[in-house]
Amino acid sequence: MTIDGRDGEHSESALRRSVLDAALAMSRRGLSPGRSGNISSRFADGMLITPSGMAYEGLEPSDIVFVGRDGGLRPGERKPSSEWRFHLDVYGARANIGGIVHTHSMHATVLACAHITIPAFHYMVAAAGGKEIPVVPYATFGTAELSRHVVKGLTKTNACLMANHGQIAVAATCEQALELAADVEVLAEQYWKLLAVAEPKLLPDDEMKRVLAHFKGYGQNAQASRDATTPPIDRQRLPPAKRIST
């Protein structure tokens, strides 16, 4: 399988369509109001990302923007999402992911604005790959400072809240990242409601370790856990993106 746009499911045209489909699904599921949020997929020496300030319903695959690993753009393409920087930097820091979804979903954003981490109140918190879903510090959108916070927040988990902003989820594909973002929103709503009625009773660390171990072999993850330790996205030999200079 190649990834240079010539053939296979990871051709450029297929990935452009997958990014657009995920963006439409994000909007239709109410995970990001209006034109907020953004979605990307790793491709070749960079990524494909939703354009800045355009309604998803009016997009075509050709509107999805290629950004090179150095932040460079192709002539004639749209302006990329204002958050392109943290997408590119996360790909540079996490060679095992191929898709990123950033949303302003209601309850995740409420907790993010209150700087409230989602702790181990429910075992499904482990779906994000850690014992909690942390909040990273605030910084102005689109800046290198925000990118550094996001990259650090995603070193030990696949999702985090962004203070006074929203949430971000990463996975092997943008479709899987969208599903994780939806899970985070459900957990955020559950935790928000729990805080209103009682003091949360958190699961202990040893139980969360067991749950995390179970998740590695759960459902479609079972085969991957029996394969080599290289993550699935690495087996597809997607080239890593370098961190952009700031």
Image (cartoon, helix red, strand yellow):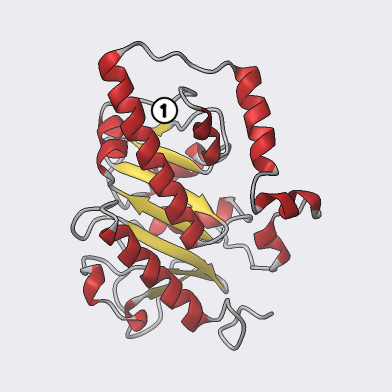
What residue sits 30% from the left and 69% below the top? 51
Q: Give the percent coordinates (x, y) of residue 117.
A: 40, 26
Farthest residue to the bottom: give it. 6
Q: Give the percent coordinates (x, y) of residue 202.
A: 48, 16
Farthest residue to the left: give it. 34
Report whether 145 appears left or right of 43: left
Up/down of 95 relative to 207, above or below? below
Report whether 181 appears left or right of 27: right
Farthest residue to the front: give it. 219
Give neighbour class at mark 1: few <14, some 14-19, many 20+ (Cα, 10 Å).
many
Question: Which image quadrant: the N terminus?
Answer: bottom right
Query: Which sits in the foreground, 192 or 141?
Result: 192
Q: Secondary structure at mark 1?
A: loop
Q: Give the percent coordinates (x, y) of residue 123.
A: 53, 29
Query: Which sits in the foreground, 122 or 135?
Result: 122
What residue sits 43% from the left and 43% below the top? 183
* Residue type at tag 1: Ile
Report whether 75 appears left or right of 224: left
Using the rendered image of the protein, determine whether residue 246 is visible from the camera's viewpoint. Answer: no
What residue sits 31% from the left and 63% below the top? 81
Question: Which image quadrant: the C terminus?
Answer: bottom left
Mark count: 1
Query: Which sits in the foreground, 181 or 115?
Result: 181
Q: Give the percent coordinates (x, y) of residue 29.
A: 29, 56
Residue under label 1: 118
Q: Quadrant of residue 111?
A: top left
What residue sits 57% from the left and 71% below the top? 45
